[in-house]
Image: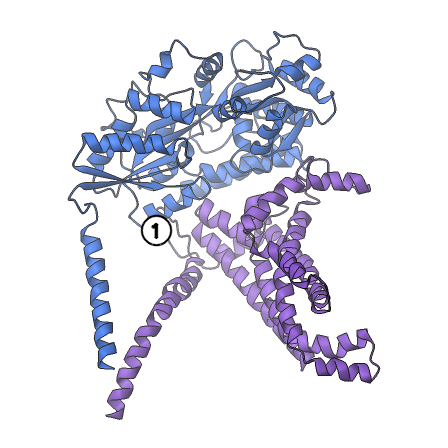
Chain colours: A purple, B blue
Amino acid sequence: MPTNSTQRLRFSDYFFLSPWVITLILFWLFPIVASLFLSFTDYRLLAGSYSFVGFDNFAQLLQDAAFTKAIGNTFIFTIGTLPFTTCFAILLAIFLNGRLPLKTFFQSVYFFPSMVSLVVVALIFTSLYARGGYIQLLCGLVGAPYPQEGFLFSTATALAAVMAMDIWMATGYYMLLFLAALQSIPNELYEAARLDGASAWRQFRVITLPHLKPMLLFIVVLNSIKSFQIFVEVFVMTKGGPLNSTNTMVYFVYEEGLQKFNIGYGAAAANILFAIIAIVSWLELKLIKDKTA
Amino acid sequence: MGKIRNCARLALVAIVVFMTAMTLSCGKSSSGRTVVTFWQFWTNPEVKPTVQQMIGEFERTHPQVKVQLGDLTWADGHEKIAIALAAGGGPDVIELGSDWISEFAASGKLSDLTAATLGLTDSLLMWDPAIYQGKRYAVPWMLGTRVLFCNRTLLKQAGYDETFVPKTWIELAEAAAKISRLGDNHFGFGSNSAERHRLYKKYLPFFWSAGGEVFNSNMTATQFSSDAGRKSLEYYLRLSANGLVETQARIEDYFAAGKIGFVISGEWLVKKLSGMERSFDYFVTTMPSPGGKKPGMSFAGGEYLVVSSASKNPDMAMGLIRFLVQPQNDTMFARATGSFTPVNTLSTMTYDAELTPIARVFQEQLHNSRSTPVHPAWVSLEEVLERGIEQALYKKKSPEDALQMIDNDCAAILKKYADQ
């Protein structure tokens, strides 16, 4: 009888788990396997036919100037945004963790950009960055140089402009995560440190930072994955231009796969991106964990 | 536990019954009427009611048919259509942009409408994009062309009299230069750049006006590095040097604010300008040409109706298309969209005695307009063309080198396509 009861229990367990399992198989595992398979073919979406081309797509990608430029831009974007977003988020979290009037108001204000639709924010920034826009006006007032043609139309500033918007938008979200981590640090530790005469910097270095490390690890990995997958900002603001100066890997995959329907080629690019994200995430985990240990 | 198992079984049975019912009901509505699905792009509140009104009238006159409308957007409609057709399903009738027809026709996803459209060929305009390898795959539904919008107030400030209309390339370039010299954030010409799917539409009219042809006779190579290509690109760069290089939407905003002398645009800008308070006068004219003896060429865009080759009701689908392009529906649709160029030559708007001067310019320009060259790989060729022009606009390459690069890259795409 116990065996029968166990079997019945298992059936119902599987049944209730099935929506998630089916979703996982259909919408996650199957596309990953299919994408890997397609990257070795010259699959043509509309014709519905394909032939195996081995590693041709990958070899061709490495010689494709647009793809190498997209990889370069993606790395610049990630390296250029991640440290700033993380540092600003930590600083804001520490600032808001102290005794401050209107604390809840400031928390809401800093978090607000994360709640607005990315498309809406991108459209607003497109207008701000335009020729004659408010940012040019501001630069003019403080005497800072700016591109006459508008920030998004200059190859020198287009990517930086997208990065700046991303930092502005993402900081509030990570700030909230850091704030949650800060509030979980026992206050007794700071009291004991103060009794021992530890300076504010030393308290930050030996108490705050070690306690923030699990959250820091999570945020660095999450933020770098998100940065490597940057798409919406580019799609709305620049379409990869001018002269590919804002073309990123996901945008490249979108253009090849869904605009030109070079599915095999696009899938190969997507798999390279997958490999890069996996390696970078593994390195980040290893580096931060080793330092924590 | 037995109850849970019974519930689970019941749920499974319900799912299977529901899916079976859904499968069996494909192509038939619950009332037994034949269902024709129609995907279209007119979602804005000014036009959608007209589409719904026409569909309602079609259903009233064809009581055995139920039309299911599906809305698409220009941002992702191409992908949605391609994926639906590739999956072997999708709608019966689809609205396509003129530059997509050959792509879908070449892959066998569209029904050959050659025989079904025999009675329509004389009454409807602009069939070229609908024809692929000698067969008609689409029916024109909506046409539009671009003309030159000119700011009369700025022209006067630049020293031109009330009657000046630029007819030659030189006249336009000189007037644009004079307006840009007015300063105070004024620009002579609105030039597109870094905006996919638009830049080529601005360059090609100049290329055609200079006598250029995109393809050689057997369509194995493009001919941008010809004299016509060089002349037209140099001219476009000259205009851009005295212009505002921006996206089309922002160029039109600048024109509406009275800051730009000349803009190439379509009917939608007339609508925009008439619905706002203006501090300047403007007029429209046909595109200038190198010599000025006849109007220059313009780009004609169009939206076409096609029938999916997977349609289970191709006759009903074609019936719906015939209905939509009838003169009275075409007139009503053109009025709703603000088009000055109805597709049906029998449409009352075509010989309306009250045609405005602006509408007459658009109709004259339509006769001197061409649409996207018909090739299944056009989307890729277009990207190469735009990237090349960008290289020249940003002075990364000379016009000659940029055009040579375009021809070389296009040749590689055409060869790859021919080898498939």
Residue placed under numbered mark 1 in the picture: A49
Q: Quadrant of the N terminus of chain A?
A: bottom left
Q: Position of residue A106 (x, y in %)?
A: 67, 59
Query: Label 1 lies in what chain?
Result: A
Q: Residue B151 sits in which quadrant?
A: top right
Q: Position of residue B137 (x, y in %)?
A: 31, 32
Reply above or below: A32 against B162. below
Q: Amino acid at mark 1?
A: Ser
Task: Give the residue displayed 64% in from the left and 32% down from the top.
Answer: B245
Q: Position of residue B328 (x, y in %)?
A: 29, 21
As rendered, which of A42 and B186 lies closer to the eye?
B186
As rendered, which of B110 and B366 lies closer to the eye?
B366
Does dot 1 land on a helix, a strand or a loop? Answer: loop
Q: Residue B242 sits in which quadrant?
A: top right
Q: Quadrant of the C terminus of chain A?
A: bottom right
Q: Residue B306 sits in which quadrant?
A: top left
Q: Position of residue B107 (x, y in %)?
A: 34, 42
